[in-house]
Amino acid sequence: MPQLSRFFGIIISMFYDDHVPPHFHAFYGEYSAQISISDFSIIEGYLPSRVLGLVVEWASIHKNELNENWKRMLDKKELLPISPLQ
């Protein structure tokens, strides 16, 4: 599970064997969700609303980097870290 970023106890990852649509995984304690890169909607799972808000804020800032990492993941290339939300 390559970790892309970590902030406020939230871990953002992508998996090399993942499926479309393009998405990333967000983990927070016992909660986890798959988040669509295109519109930041939850594909599967659950995050508390405050955490989801932070994840969406971070993802909107880094959408291009998320898309680039999705392409790198499909090509089996090393994923690049993304700056945390500050």
Image (spheres, grey):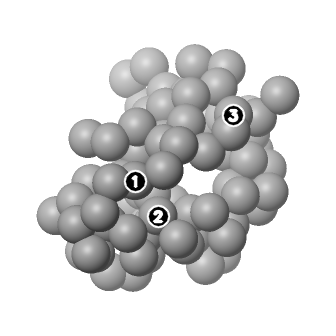
Q: Is residue 1 above or below residue 86?
A: below
SS under mark 3: loop
Please name the amino acid that badge 3 sits on: Pro
Point out residue 58 in the picture as x, y percentages from the top left corner.
73, 47
Which image quadrant for residue 50? top right
* Residue at left offset 61%, top offset 78%: 38
Left or right: residue 30 compared with residue 77: right
Q: Nearer the viewer, residue 23 or 46?
A: 23
Can residue 26 be seen here? The reply is no
Q: Which residue is mark 1?
A: 79
Left or right: residue 23 compared with residue 59: left
* Residue at left offset 76%, top offset 61%: 60
Point out residue 10 in the picture as x, y percentages from the top left corner.
56, 28
Question: Disc 1 versus disc 3: distance between alpha carbons?
Answer: 15 Å
* Residue at left offset 32%, top offset 42%: 2
Q: Which residue is mark 3?
A: 84
Q: Which label is found at residue 69? A: 2
The reply to whether dot 1 and dot 2 touch (C-beta < 8 Å) is yes
